[in-house]
Image (spheres, helix red, strand yellow):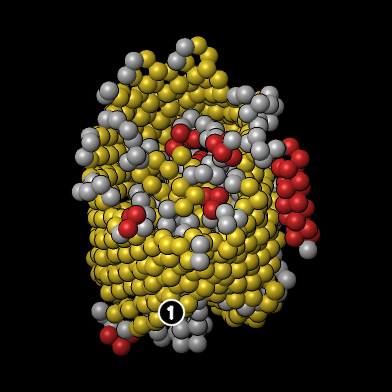
């Protein structure tokens, strides 16, 4: 009730403030839209995005929270981890373990259960799923030197995307450049950070081509945590006709990351940067090689070109080596496709937009298991499984104008079918299959108080099937002889949100000429939430009965005076288990494995802070001629988090202070960008990642200590 009252008050005050300060007759149409700010991590309300509704639509017209970030907005930042770029988006919380390639992304609590990789949030690259058919995601191919923009949908997106109860993040490579260019980028930092590469774009009247290659090397701030990567991204596009577009999208990634593991509280307090001894003894690491080739064709047709159709097909090849106590080699081969159709028409004098589409992704390949002997695989294959995972789904969506230019209703629904097929090549009787299916509807309303301020609300269902790495069976299941856990069910949720977003522009003012704001209240009831637990340090998954998540997220970006901008992002998360009786597999005092029923009802959901506050003050001005200077100081406060479902321990609050300084110099066809900074200025020791529900108490992984970074980018534009 308090959250609802807070949001209602915000909406009423914003409405009163808008009309008290603005004369609608004197407000020019162009002034009703947000003017992009170079350092802001928030979007323009007139930006056109496709991720939110799978049709091209202005953000102000979408009846839920959608954010768009342009690469110019983070050009001075470190840009190594995804948290360097998305940290200021309200409702999004990230815990980075060893850099960009093993990060937990949580949106409104969805994704917080994953101890490795990303779950509950759909990740796209150029609109093509980076997420596996089961929803598990790793983001090795995401290169912020190549990315041109990022679109983030916060909250339930299951009515349009598979396994997306928390939302969608779409990284879009930088193909929309106007002229041919070549760029060299070089990043340096603490702990032997090196990122070097080249970016080139060719633009003619008929086609565009983008190529980026990045080499990343990082020793890591913890022992046994180094990583290196080669990342290549390419996009080729051409226009076969006036209303058509054809693209070829490809990438290739190869690299290695070593894993230092989680620590006990005693180990963390003694030396928070040490590696766990088991991870060192067995040389825990991930070797990855993967590539993707995609083809996309889009065209508009019909009277007034009111119809649009787009088809995308793609293939993937992946090779992974995963060393833990078992040495695992994984080969995966995938084929996928996406089709979408859009029709714009008029019904009874009101605008109507209908869209339909479908997605198909099929992936198969062998998984080989060997003994891990000091980090080397044994000669004898102790397990060989052929694994096939598939996902198919289709959606329908309709957006109708109820009141002219004021009130719109958006209705959407999706049916998904996910299947797992595992064949044990060494013991055929253990072959196993599991399937999951669901229909997820959603209805949303958008009321535009003015062309640039809107109130929105949505209600819908979401569905999230278990991932392949969550399905392995465990010793105390109802049928331990099966390959796949027969007890693990999909999690389903009912989601509601109410919010307001907009921008107030007063060009005649000296102070507060431009104010962007958004506030959203959300409420989710989750049934059968999938949560991890451990048996002798091996991670398995089970369902809790009922989880209640309620929260408030708010963002503000204001130009205080010319050149000085203030950004505020705050998220309040009140997440708890309403009903949760679990069979806890534990070790007794004599080292025997026992099963105990425990009641976790009314406990707080782990690994989610109740309060997450970020503040940033930046100053940018033209110093002399074509020389521009930039500086920013940023502050983050994160409240303590519980480490397990039992709520046995809670991490300390932490406060981080960061500083960035940059210069942008243009001389002729050359452009030089110099930037640098320091993060965690006071060298705070804090828990940056929680390995939840560890039975041996290994919950804790250190956040990055004080670190310095510098960038030198040189760009030449052909005119």
Q: Is residue 399 left or right of residue 648?
A: left
- Residue drawn 72% across the image and 46% down it: 14
- Residue drawn 45% across the image and 50% down it: 49
Query: What number of labels is visible?
Result: 1
Q: Is residue 431 left or right of residue 76?
A: left
In the displayed image of the protein, which residue is found farthest to the top? 624
In the displayed image of the protein, which residue is found farthest to the front? 349
For the residue pair 434 and 150, the one nearer the viewer reads as 150
- Residue drawn 41% across the image and 60% down it: 344
The C terminus sits in image quarter? top left
Residue 94 appears anywhere in the view: no
Q: Quadrant of residue 718?
A: top left
**Disc 1 element:** strand
Task: Check disc 1 and report the residue beneath it.
Answer: 436
Residue 333 percent location from the top left of the image: 25, 64
Residue 313 percent location from the top left of the image: 26, 61
Q: Is residue 64 above or below residue 180?
A: below
Q: Quadrant of residue 173?
A: top left
Residue 212 appears anywhere in the view: yes
Q: Is residue 75 left or right of residue 146?
A: right
The N terminus sits in image quarter? bottom right
Residue 284 percent location from the top left of the image: 40, 55
For the residue pair 210 and 580, the one nearer the viewer reads as 210
Residue 423 percent location from the top left of the image: 29, 80
């Amino acid at each position: 009730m308090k959250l609802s009252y807070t949001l209602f008050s915000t909406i009423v005050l914003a409405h009163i403030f808008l009309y008290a300060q603005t004369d609608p007759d004197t407000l020019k149409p162009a002034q009703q839209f947000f003017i992009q700010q170079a350092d802001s991590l928030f979007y323009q309300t007139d930006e056109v995005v496709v991720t939110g509704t799978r049709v091209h639509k202005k953000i102000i017209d979408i009846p839920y929270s959608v954010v768009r970030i342009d690469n110019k907005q983070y050009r001075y930042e470190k840009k190594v981890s995804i948290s360097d770029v998305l940290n200021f988006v309200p409702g999004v919380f990230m815990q980075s373990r060893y850099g960009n390639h093993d990060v937990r992304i949580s949106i409104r609590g969805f994704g917080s259960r994953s101890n490795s990789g990303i779950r509950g949030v759909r990740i796209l690259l150029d609109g093509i799923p980076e997420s596996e058919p089961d929803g598990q995601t790793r983001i090795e191919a995401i290169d912020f030197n190549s990315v041109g923009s990022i679109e983030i949908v916060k909250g339930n997106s299951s009515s349009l995307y598979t396994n997306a109860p928390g939302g969608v993040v779409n990284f879009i490579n930088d193909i929309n450049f106007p002229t041919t260019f070549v760029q060299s980028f070089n990043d340096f930092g603490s702990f032997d950070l090196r990122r070097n590469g080249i970016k080139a774009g060719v633009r003619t009247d008929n086609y565009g081509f983008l190529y980026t290659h990045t080499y990343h090397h990082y020793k890591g701030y913890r022992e046994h945590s180094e990583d290196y990567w080669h990342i290549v991204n390419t996009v080729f596009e051409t226009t076969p006709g006036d209303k058509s577009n054809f693209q070829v999208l490809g990438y290739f990634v190869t690299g290695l990351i070593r894993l230092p593991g989680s620590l006990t509280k005693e180990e963390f307090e003694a030396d928070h940067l040490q590696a766990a001894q088991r991870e060192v003894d067995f040389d825990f690491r991930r070797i990855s090689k993967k590539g993707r080739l995609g083809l996309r064709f889009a065209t508009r047709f019909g009277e007034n070109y009111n119809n649009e159709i787009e088809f995308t097909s793609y293939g993937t090849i992946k090779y992974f080596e995963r060393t833990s106590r078992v040495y695992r080699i994984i080969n995966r081969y995938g084929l996928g496709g996406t089709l979408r159709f859009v029709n714009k028409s008029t019904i009874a004098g009101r605008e109507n937009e209908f869209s339909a589409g479908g997605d198909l992704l099929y992936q198969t390949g062998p998984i080989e298991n060997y003994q891990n002997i000091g980090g080397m695989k044994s000669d004898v294959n102790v397990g060989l499984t052929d694994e096939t995972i598939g996902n198919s789904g289709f959606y329908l969506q309709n957006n109708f104008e109820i009141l002219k230019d004021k009130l719109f209703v958006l209705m959407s629904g999706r049916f998904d079918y996910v299947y797992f097929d595992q064949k044990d090549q060494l013991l055929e009787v253990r072959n196993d299959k599991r399937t999951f299916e669901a229909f997820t509807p959603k209805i949303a309303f958008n009321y535009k108080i003015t062309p640039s301020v809107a109130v929105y609300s949505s209600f819908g269902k979401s569905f999230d099937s278990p991932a392949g790495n969550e399905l392995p069976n465990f010793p105390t299941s109802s049928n331990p002889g099966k390959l796949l856990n027969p007890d693990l069910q999909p999690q389903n949720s009912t989601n509601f949100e109410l919010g307001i977003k907009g921008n107030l522009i007063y060009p005649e003012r000296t102070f507060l000429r431009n104010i962007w704001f958004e506030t959203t209240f959300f409420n989710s009831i989750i049934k059968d939430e999938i949560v991890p637990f451990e048996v002798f340090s091996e991670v398995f998954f089970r369902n809790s009965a009922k989880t209640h998540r309620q929260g408030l997220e708010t963002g503000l970006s204001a130009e205080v005076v010319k050149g000085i901008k203030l950004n505020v992002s705050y998220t309040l998360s009140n997440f708890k288990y309403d009903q949760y009786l679990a069979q806890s597999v534990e070790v007794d005092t004599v080292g025997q494995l026992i099963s105990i029923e425990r009641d976790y009802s009314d406990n707080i959901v782990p690994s989610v802070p109740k309060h997450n506050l970020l503040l940033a003050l930046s100053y940018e001005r033209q110093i002399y001629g074509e020389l521009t200077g930039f500086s920013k100081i940023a502050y983050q406060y994160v409240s303590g988090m519980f480490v397990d479902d039992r709520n046995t321990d809670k991490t300390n609050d932490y406060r981080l202070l960061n500083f960035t300084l940059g210069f942008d110099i243009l001389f002729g066809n050359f452009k030089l960008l110099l930037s640098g900074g320091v993060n965690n200025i006071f060298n705070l020791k804090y828990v940056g990642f929680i390995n939840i529900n560890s039975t041996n108490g290994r919950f804790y992984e250190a956040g990055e200590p004080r670190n310095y970074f510098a960038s030198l980018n040189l760009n030449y534009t052909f005119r």
